C-alpha cells in the first residue's frame, strides 16, 4: 500500500531577519530543507515539482506547525508546513492528509486515482495524480509492473529528494519483507525473507533509502506497516484487504471468503495507528537510519475475526473457504518495542475497537437504506 508525503517549512526574508524565539531557530535549522513521508512511487515529474516547491517557498508563515508549539512563534504569524502526500487519495494516504489538515497544515496530493478516490479528499484543497501498486496477489500475477512501479518509483523519489536537499525520507515499508520467518513476534533484526514480488520491492525500497543515507547523507526511516485496515479501504477489488472484503460481503449478504483454513493470523493495525507513527517518524531525533515495525503487537486469526464480527453484527456469518493463495504468509505479528523506544509510539486503537469503527463506517458508506 502506498501511503507517502513530503513537507517543506516555508520561510521568508522577514522570518530570517528576526532572531526571536523558536521561529528563528527553526528557520536556521530547516532552511532549504524538505521532509518526506514517503510511500513507494513517484513519477519522474516529481523532480520538477520539488524544484518548483523549493523555488516558491518564500511565502510568509501563516498557520500553526503543530499545537505543541502554539505560542512560541513570531508574533506576526505562525509557521505553516507544506506537505505533498503521494498516493494521498488512497486509503492510508487520505487518512494522513486528513490528520495534516486537522493540524492546519497545507496539503497537496499526488495520485493517479488508480486505487484512490477523489471523494477521499474533501478536506484537501489541491492534488496532482500519481500511481501505486500495493497488492501481494497482484504482484505474483504481474511482478514486472510491481517492480517498475515500486522500485523504479522509489528510486525516482530518492533522487528528487537528494537533488532538492531533502532532510529526511520516511518510507512506507511493509511487514511482507519478513516473509515466512517462523519466529514471532517479528523483530527488526530478523533477516528479511520475502516470499512475494511485492515483499521484495518493499525491502529493496528500504535498502535504497539506507544507501542514499550512507552515500548522500539523506536521512531515512522505514516503517514496516502490518496489515493496515479501517475506513476508506476500497473493498471492490479481488486484491483488496481481507477486512474490507469481509465488510462488503456482510453488507451484501454473501459468505465471507477465506483463503486457507482461517487459522492464519495477522497483526491487524487500525489506520489511525500508522498515521500517528508515520508523523512521529518525521520528527524523532533517533529515527534516521532505522527500520521500525508499525503494528499493535497482537495477532488475530481470520476465524477469530469472524467470531468478533458475529458479536458486532449480532448474528451468525456464513464463511466460504478457498485454497490458500501463493505469496500469502501464514502468521504475522509485530514487536513494537523499538518503535516505542525511538518514536514514543503506542497503538491508539486496538483491534476490537478498530473493527467496530470500521464496520460502522462501511455500513454507513455502503449499506442499503
Image (cartoon, rainbow, N blue to C red):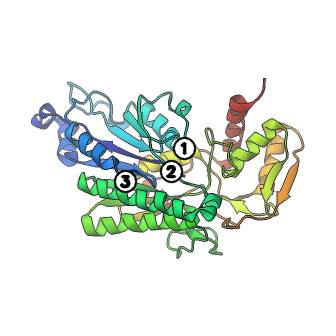
Residue bearing mark 2: 132
Q: Using the numbered discs, state the Cα–Cα distance from disc 2 to disc 1 in whole angstroms.
A: 7 Å
Report x, y in % for residue 281: 41, 52
Verify CB contact (< 8 Å) between mark 2 and mark 1.
yes
Report x, y in % for residue 240: 66, 49
Report x, y in % for residue 43: 39, 50
Instruction: Tell me the element at label 2.
Output: loop
Q: Is residue 239 above or below residue 121?
A: below
Instruction: Tell me the element at label 1.
Output: loop
Q: Using the numbered discs, state the Cα–Cα distance from disc 3 to disc 1 in whole angstroms.
A: 33 Å
Instruction: Tell me the element at label 3.
Output: loop
Report x, y in % for residue 350: 64, 48
248 to the left or right of 131: right
Residue bearing mark 1: 114
Q: Is residue 333 above or below residue 33?
A: below
Tell me, yes or no, if residue 352 can be seen here.
Answer: no
14 to the left or right of 316: left
Residue bearing mark 3: 284
Q: Using the numbered discs, state the Cα–Cα distance from disc 2 to disc 3 in whole angstroms.
A: 27 Å
Amino acid at each position: 500500500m502506498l501511503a507517502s508525503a513530503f513537507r517543506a517549512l516555508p520561510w521568508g526574508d522577514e522570518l530570517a531577519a528576526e532572531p526571536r524565539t523558536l521561529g528563528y531557530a527553526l528557520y536556521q535549522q530547516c532552511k532549504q530543507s524538505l521532509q518526506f513521508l514517503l510511500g513507494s512511487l513517484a513519477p519522474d515529474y516529481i523532480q520538477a515539482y520539488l524544484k518548483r516547491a523549493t523555488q516558491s517557498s518564500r511565502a510568509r508563515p501563516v498557520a500553526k506547525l503543530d499545537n505543541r508549539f502554539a505560542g512560541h512563534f513570531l508574533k506576526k504569524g505562525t509557521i505553516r508546513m507544506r506537505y505533498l502526500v503521494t498516493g494521498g487519495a488512497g486509503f492510508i494516504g487520505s487518512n494522513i492528509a486528513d490528520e495534516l489538515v486537522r493540524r492546519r497544515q497545507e496539503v497537496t496530493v499526488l495520485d493517479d486515482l488508480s486505487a484512490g478516490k477523489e471523494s477521499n479528499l474533501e478536506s484537501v484543497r489541491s492534488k496532482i495524480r500519481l500511481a501505486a501498486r500495493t497488492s501481494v496477489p497482484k504482484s505474483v500475477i504481474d511482478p514486472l509492473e510491481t517492480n517498475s512501479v515500486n522500485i523504479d518509483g522509489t528510486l525516482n523519489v530518492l533522487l528528487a529528494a537528494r537533488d532538492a536537499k531533502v532532510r529526511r525520507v520516511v518510507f512506507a515499508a511493509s511487514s511482507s519483507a519478513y516473509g515466512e520467518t517462523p519466529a514471532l513476534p517479528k523483530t527488526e533484526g530478523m533477516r528479511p525473507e520475502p516470499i512475494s514480488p511485492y515483499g521484495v520491492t518493499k525491502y529493496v525500497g528500504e535498502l535504497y533509502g539506507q544507501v542514499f543515507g550512507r552515500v548522500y547523507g539523506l536521512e531515512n526511516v522505514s516503517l514496516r506497516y502490518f496489515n493496515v485496515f479501517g475506513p476508506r479501504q476500497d473493498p471492490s477489488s479481488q486484491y483488496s484487504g481481507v477486512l474490507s472484503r469481509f465488510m462488503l460481503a456482510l453488507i451484501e449478504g454473501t459468505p465471507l471468503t477465506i483463503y486457507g483454513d482461517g487459522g492464519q493470523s495477522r497483526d491487524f493495525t487500525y489506520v489511525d495507528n500508522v498515521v500517528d507513527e508515520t508523523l512521529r517518524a518525521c520528527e524523532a531525533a533517533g529515527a534516521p537510519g532505522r527500520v521500525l515495525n508499525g503494528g499493535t503487537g497482537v495477532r488475530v486469526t481470520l476465524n477469530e475475526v469472524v467470531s468478533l464480527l458475529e458479536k458486532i453484527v449480532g448474528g451468525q456469518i456464513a464463511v466460504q473457504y478457498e485454497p490458500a493463495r501463493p505469496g500469502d504468509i501464514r502468521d504475522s505479528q509485530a514487536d513494537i518495542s523499538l518503535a516505542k523506544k525511538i518514536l514514543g509510539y503506542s497503538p491508539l486503537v486496538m483491534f476490537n475497537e478498530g473493527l467496530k469503527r470500521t464496520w460502522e463506517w462501511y455500513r454507513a458508506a455502503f449499506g442499503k437504506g
